[in-house]
Amino acid sequence: MTTMNISLPEALKAFIDEQVAGGGYGTSSEYVRDLIRKEQDRERVRALLLEGAASGPGVKADADYFAKLRARASGHKA
């Protein structure tokens, strides 16, 4: 693991210290790593949503659609 030093205003440092004390984090590094992972997840979800939006209209998910899906999953024809 590599090290990165960052400079924070006192108010942000105090906020992080509060989060560590009350949020189940052992260190400020754990808290910051968790924030970064959450941001990575958010960006992945955003990319998937944009990809889906650009893919065009989907199939109507009605009762017939789900019946065919269940049949396909069970290996039968609907």
Image: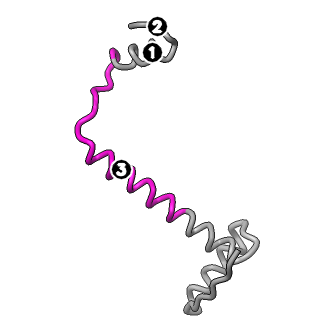
Question: Circle 1 sits on which residue?
Answer: 72
Specify the segment rendered in magenta: 38-64
Q: Quadrant of the N terminus?
A: bottom right
Please determine whether, in this image, residue 33 is positioned above or below residue 55: below
Q: Is-magenta flag for residue 62? A: yes
Q: Is-magenta flag for residue 59? A: yes
The residue at 66%/78% (across/down) is 18
Judged from this view, the residue extending furthest toward the left is 57
Query: Which-is-in-front pick, marks 1 and 3?
Result: 1
Please report contact status of discs 2 and 1: CB closer than 8 Å, yes or no.
yes
Three-letter residue code for mark 3: Leu
As drawn, the label of residue 58 is none
- Residue 27 location (% of width, % of height): 73, 76
* Displayed quadrant of residue 52: top left
Please determine whether, in this image, residue 20 is positioned above or below residue 50: below
Marks 2/1: CA–CA distance: 6 Å
Question: Circle 2 sits on which residue?
Answer: 76
| Residue 31 placement, left or right of 74 | right
- Residue 74 location (% of width, % of height): 52, 13
* Residue at disc 1, secondary structure: helix
Marks 3/2: CA–CA distance: 32 Å
* Residue at disc 3, secondary structure: helix
Helix, strand or loop for the magenta stretch, by majority: helix
Of mark 3 and mark 2, the one earlier in the sequence is 3
Question: Circle 3 sits on which residue?
Answer: 49
* Displayed quadrant of residue 28: bottom right
